[in-house]
Image (cartoon, coloured by chain):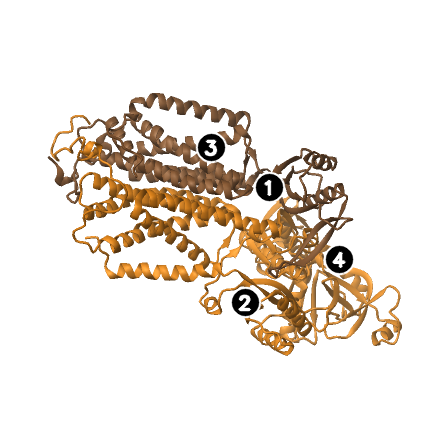
């Protein structure tokens, strides 16, 4: 099998202007949505309480919402989570309410709405582990709803996480730039990082536009993508350097075209493989990994695009020259290079 | 040329064996077990407890797989849950003769089903995080400001006593936050005062300030001392939390310090947050009350009369009963410290208590009015009070420094001090993060995490084998080896596996295949360029390596910064991610090369390699030859 039967180098750089314009427009749109809509931050960042309950039958979300709203916690969000029986309730931080008791109160109210009462149930699982949990049972002894998980995050923790996240992003960007500058050249460092930050902003733009929940896991995905798609630029830059060494007659943009064309097959296959894994998480990983895998998918797809069209393009605009990469005093051709002998 | 020396194969073989050894325990699953741990601050679990447990089980005719002493607990594993529950009852009866006052916690738990010899090699399964297991997680913030204030408060009392003892006259001592201020009438007195205080209280840094005829001496805690106070506060809170959590009877509670001023409490299997919070959040379990010494009370003590009105009967640690008034004089909140020590004159072991200002005032008043009478210090554990000590008041005690002496060995004094400290928190704590995960959700999460790794892996393996044929098989094997090494390393480190961690495993595998794709593409390219197969393999691997190194380093940079700045679940993700990058370097380059060498290396006249179709444009020498490389000395006119 061979997917890529390319006879000539594809003249990517001829269209660089158009492609960069497209990039710029997507980028601008992402920034626009980020500023106007903002990110829908999870309670990990904002602080608040989250309660997940599972109903034994299809959940009546309006009744749940009415019940929770009646408790007067301010702006509550009630939504389905994963299946039609799972409901997720988000409550904001309120200064006047003791946060630690919120979850229990809400569960009791929901239980009452299903005409049941809350009691502590103690039992041993079939595997032999002792479990005690608050359970809601009605007169018939059935459990109309179950508390799956609760999460409470204080406001101070949230702001700290946001700060640490920003720091992590900053350090990653600087670290990668420093490495690229050391390994290649500053023009590549700038081009690589711009291309990949552009990916990050576009992922964030998607999250802002669709108002998907931006959680800690998504942040981790974004940073992982940043590291990952820089790979892509590295592979292409590596080729550019090598091509500059081997084909002296080519102009910089021909060199870039050649580098991209010859690495394209690897780019698509690698990203395709990674994407398969990520999609597997998307389909089998359940609601917890849902947005994590979405962020990764977008990151991978845009990673291909940006390394091919953006990174190399920017390097070209910055005026990458042969002399930048090939030390003139050094031996241009490696004596161990097996292709060196093939010179005609 | 494509041959490895024997030691390289040896390294691979050892890695494979070690990887298998440490991965396998994760596959055994878990078996029911009974875990015995200490239920009281004074009871220590030691190796001999395992013998007692074994004897109790033997006596009842129950056969455990093994009984093991491990750190702070004894575990007995059973083949089924019926046996487990019977064993729990048997052990409880044997170890806790008084069910109302258990010395040991006997809890049901799960332990790995792996054979014992693996456990001896420390080949244990990964510890499952709460999101995979179900349970409660609390993150508690220790209020350091109040810990420092408490310390300053105690120091204020000390200063007052010191100055009085040395007859140095001052016009007032006050405390503002963490700063203590002493006012003197003239500079000479201030100087003597400062000399004395600097000498006696090395924790404070003094500065003098003359102001309108008065001299003010302000003392602030030295940074090192403040830090020590904070460290001690967190440590004491953790000890106290341990004691309180014991009350819940949880098999494996995790109580750890996180950062400078936070404590993580994780209680697997517990879903009842209200009770957990109630127990953890209790402010004081220590009470000081007066002993009722009336004739009626004496009769009641001997058991020959009813307990007088307004009094209660408690049991002293020796087993004697004692009648104390219901009225509480002081609680553990007013106790800042308790340390074992020696009496300066009699050389008897003592327990030295330090009270805060409010406590000191009350204590002084009470002791003045009750010289010659007894007071009792009670510790409440599991809702039951126990008299730790009931000393006679010899004299009025001012200044908040209390010394309890008499009828004690050094070990007893140490124990008592520990018990008294355990009754109070050094500084109040606030729950700033709380998570509960239901047990069924945990099981679902494991399944989902597992499925995504397996299906993703299969998809990649099938594709690789179809696209690169035999080289694809090598790549898939290398990927499987990577998974094996990663799981083995995580198990060796006894890392806690969480759902984000599982996601990181999946993602790492998805990214690790990149190295093999790079290699295979390079080999194909060399073949396309007309290189003979053996040369193509060698050059392909060599050339791809530089690129692989570069790209892994950039990924590692992102991983390390996540590790440094991430917290909680993100940290778990980052650990797995970073480890995965390291293992993938080894497996995708060295292991897959090893396989290729093993398969093709011996064949001297290799005609073709099975790496899928190597397509050449129009049967020409190949794309790369479209423009022949320049001679080394050709001018680079176009550059």
Q: Element under label 1? A: helix
**Which quadrant would residue A327 be assigned to in this image?**
top left
Q: Which residue is mark 1?
A: A156
| Distance between the alpha carbons at the discs numbered 3 and 4 | 63 Å
Q: Which residue is mark 2?
A: B71
- Picture layout, residue A288 above or below residue B151: above
Other-residue count near label 4 (Cα within 10 Å), few / some / many at <14 / 14–19 / ≥20: some
Is disc 3 in contact with disc 1, using a CB cutoff of under 8 Å?
Answer: no
Query: At 80% from the left edge and 68% from the top edge, which residue is drawn?
Result: B371
Q: Are marks 4 and 2 on the same chain?
A: yes
| Distance between the alpha carbons at the discs numbered 3 and 1 | 27 Å
Q: How many marks?
A: 4
Mark 4 vs mark 2, foreground winner is: 2
Mark 1 vs mark 4, foreground winner is: 1
Q: Which residue is mark 4?
A: B361
What chain is colored brown?
A
Front residue of this view, candidates A127 and A13: A127
**Which quadrant would residue B300 be assigned to in this image?**
bottom right
């Amino acid at each position: 099998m061979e997917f890529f039967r390319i006879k000539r180098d594809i003249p990517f750089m001829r269209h660089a202007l158009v492609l960069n314009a497209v990039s710029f427009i997507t980028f601008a749109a992402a920034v626009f949505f980020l500023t106007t809509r903002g990110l829908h931050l999870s309670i990990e960042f904002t602080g608040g309480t989250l309660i997940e309950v599972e109903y034994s039958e299809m959940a009546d979300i309006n009744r749940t919402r009415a019940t929770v709203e009646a408790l007067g916690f301010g702006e509550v969000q009630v939504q389905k989570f994963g299946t039609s029986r799972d409901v997720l309730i988000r409550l904001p931080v309120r200064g006047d309410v003791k946060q630690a008791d919120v979850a229990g109160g809400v569960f009791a109210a929901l239980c009452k709405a299903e005409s049941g009462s809350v009691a502590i149930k103690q039992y041993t699982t079939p595997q032999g582990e002792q479990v005690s949990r608050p359970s809601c049972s009605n007169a018939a002894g059935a459990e109309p709803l179950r508390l799956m998980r609760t999460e409470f995050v204080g406001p101070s923790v949230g702001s700290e996480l946001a700060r640490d996240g920003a720091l992590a992003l900053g350090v990653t960007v600087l670290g990668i730039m420093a490495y690229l500058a050391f390994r290649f050249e500053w023009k590549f460092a700038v081009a690589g990082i711009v291309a990949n930050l552009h990916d990050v902003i576009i992922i964030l733009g998607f999250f802002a536009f669709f108002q998907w929940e931006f959680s800690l896991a998504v942040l981790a995905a974004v940073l992982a993508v940043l590291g990952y798609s820089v790979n892509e630029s590295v592979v292409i830059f590596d080729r550019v350097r090598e091509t500059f060494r081997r084909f002296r007659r080519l102009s910089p943009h021909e060199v870039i075209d050649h580098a991209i064309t010859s690495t394209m097959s690897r780019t698509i296959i690698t990203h395709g493989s990674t994407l398969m894994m990520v999609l597997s998480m998307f389909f089998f990983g359940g609601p917890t990994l849902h947005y994590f895998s979405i962020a990764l998918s977008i990151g991978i797809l845009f990673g291909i695009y940006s390394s091919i069209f953006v990174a190399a393009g920017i390097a070209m605009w910055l005026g990458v020259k042969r002399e930048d990469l090939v030390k003139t005093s050094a031996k241009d051709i490696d004596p161990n290079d097996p292709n060196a002998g093939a010179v005609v | 040329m494509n041959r490895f020396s024997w030691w390289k194969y040896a390294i691979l073989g050892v890695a494979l064996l070690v990887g298998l050894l440490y991965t396998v325990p994760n596959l055994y699953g878990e078996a029911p077990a009974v875990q015995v741990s200490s239920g009281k601050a004074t009871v220590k679990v030691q190796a001999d407890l395992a013998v007692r447990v074994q004897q109790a089980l033997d006596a009842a005719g129950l056969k455990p797989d093994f009984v093991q002493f491990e750190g702070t607990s004894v575990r007995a594993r059973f083949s089924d849950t019926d046996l487990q529950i019977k064993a729990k009852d048997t052990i409880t009866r044997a170890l806790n003769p008084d069910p109302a006052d258990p010395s040991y916690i006997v809890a049901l738990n799960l332990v790995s089903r792996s054979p014992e010899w693996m456990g001896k090699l420390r080949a244990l399964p990964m510890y499952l995080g709460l999101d995979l297991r179900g349970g409660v997680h609390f993150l508690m913030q220790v209020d350091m400001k109040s810990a420092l204030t408490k310390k300053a408060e105690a120091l204020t009392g000390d200063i007052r006593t010191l100055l009085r003892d040395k007859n140095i006259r001052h016009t007032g001592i006050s405390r503002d936050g963490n700063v203590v201020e002493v006012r003197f009438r003239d500079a000479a007195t201030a100087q003597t005062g400062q000399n004395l205080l600097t000498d006696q209280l090395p924790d404070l840094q003094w500065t003098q300030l003359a102001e309108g005829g008065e001299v003010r001496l302000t003392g602030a805690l030295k940074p090192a001392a403040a830090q020590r106070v904070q460290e001690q506060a967190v440590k004491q809170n953790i000890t106290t939390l341990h004691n309180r959590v014991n009350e819940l009877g949880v098999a494996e509670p995790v109580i750890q310090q996180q950062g400078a001023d936070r404590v993580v409490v994780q209680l697997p299997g517990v879903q009842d947050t209200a009770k957990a919070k109630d127990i953890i959040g209790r402010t004081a379990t220590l009470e000081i009350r007066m002993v009722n010494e009336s004739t009626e009370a004496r009769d009641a003590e001997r058991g020959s009369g009813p307990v007088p009105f307004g009094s209660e009967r408690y049991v002293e640690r020796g087993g004697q009963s004692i009648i104390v008034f219901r009225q509480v004089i002081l609680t553990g909140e007013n106790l800042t410290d308790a340390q074992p020590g020696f009496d300066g004159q009699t050389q008897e072991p003592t327990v030295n208590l330090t009270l805060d200002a409010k406590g000191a005032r009350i204590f002084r008043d009470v002791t003045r009015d009750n010289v010659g009478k007894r007071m009792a210090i009670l510790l409440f554990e599991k809702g039951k009070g126990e008299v730790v000590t009931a000393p006679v008041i010899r004299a009025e005690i001012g200044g908040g420094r209390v010394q309890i002496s008499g009828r004690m060995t050094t070990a007893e004094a140490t124990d008592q001090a520990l018990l008294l400290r355990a009754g109070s928190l050094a500084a109040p704590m606030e729950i700033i993060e709380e998570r509960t995960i239901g047990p069924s959700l945990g099981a679902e999460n494991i399944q989902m995490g597992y499925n995504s790794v397996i299906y993703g892996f299969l998809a990649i393996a099938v594709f690789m084998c179809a696209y690169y044929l035999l080289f694809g098989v090598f790549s898939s094997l290398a990927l499987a080896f990577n998974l094996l090494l990663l799981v083995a390393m995580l198990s060796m480190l006894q890392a806690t596996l969480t759902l984000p961690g599982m996601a990181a495993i999946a993602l790492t595998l998805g990214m690790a295949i990149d190295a093999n794709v790079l290699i295979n593409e390079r080999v194909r390219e060399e073949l396309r360029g007309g290189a003979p197969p053996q040369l193509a393999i060698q050059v392909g691997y060599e050339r791809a390596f530089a690129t692989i190194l570069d790209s892994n380093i950039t990924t590692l940079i992102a991983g390390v910064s996540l590790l440094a700045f991430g917290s909680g679940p993100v940290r778990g993700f980052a650990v797995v991610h970073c480890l995965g990058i390291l293992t993938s370097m080894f497996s995708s380059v060295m292991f897959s090369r090893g396989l290729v060498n093993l398969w093709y290396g011996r064949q001297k006249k290799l005609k073709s390699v099975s790496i899928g179709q190597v397509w050449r444009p129009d049967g020409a020498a190949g794309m790369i030859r479209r423009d022949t490389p320049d001679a080394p000395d050709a001018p680079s006119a176009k550059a």
